[in-house]
Image: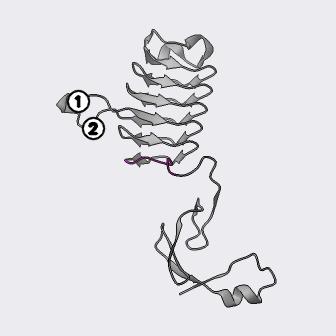
Amino acid sequence: MPIVNVKGIENCIIYHPELVNLYECEIGALTKIGAFVEIGKDVVIGRQCKIESHAFIPEGVRIGNFVFVGPGVIFCNVKYPMTGENYHFTTVRDGAVIGAGAVILPGLIIGEKSIIGAGSVVTKNVGIMKPPKTIMRLCVFCRFKTMHTHVKYIFNEWYECLICGTKSKVNHEKTKNSNNRRRKQFSFH
């Protein structure tokens, strides 16, 4: 299996060089590449990334620094394969994690420190509206571990969880009588 005109190949770690296909790409220092990985022409991969086995990264993909690409991840670069259209560029920003078997459709942006779950099919941009290093926490509405911006104010002290659709009202009477005034208590209706 060939390694052809790869920039930075001397500074990266390839576990089985005889089992990878690397074509005219650029790989950052200390990046680790597993067996049976295919990286296409003009792909740029940042430094200290980890590309697990059986990943497919075709032409038109840009991967930032400190990115983890799990085993069997497939990036697509053309929306309509038989039309002869140009490649759509996909960008994975610094610190993102892509779980095993995920499929990334063409022309998307995966934001900084975003997490893509195993087996996901990514059809829209991920994590580009949230600030970097967003704190994840447990939702008081649906008990999902999610970003803190997923609860929307509706009207007159009513809130809605954007994940599960649960509507709730803040009960200020319980808050006033509580010894811990900083803790909001929600009553579900």
- What's under tag 2, amino acid-wise? Lys
The residue at the far top in this view is: 5
Q: Residue at x 58, y 43 (%)?
A: 113
Which one is in front, 2 or 110?
110
The local crowd at label 2, few if under 14, some if 14 to 19, many if 20 or more residues have their Cα within 10 Å, is: some
| Above or below: residue 117 compared with residue 42 | below
Extent of the magenta region: 123-129
Where's the N terminus, which quadrant? top left
Q: Residue at x 55, y 13 (%)?
A: 9
Q: To which residue does mark 1 refer?
A: 85
Q: Secondary structure at mark 1?
A: loop
Q: Is residue 128 magenta?
A: yes
Please indicate whether residue 12 sits to the left or right of residue 129 in the image.
Answer: right
Provide residue 148's location: percent of width, then percent of height. Answer: 60, 62
Q: Secondary structure at mark 2?
A: loop
Please indicate whether residue 181 sits to the left or right of residue 151 in the image.
Answer: right
Q: Is residue 115 magenta?
A: no
Q: Residue at x 73, y 76 (%)?
A: 183
Q: Who comes first in sequence, dot 2 or dot 1? A: 2
Q: Are marks 2 and 1 in contact (CB under 8 Å)?
A: yes
Query: Marks 2 and 1, Cα distance to the nearest angstrom?
Result: 8 Å
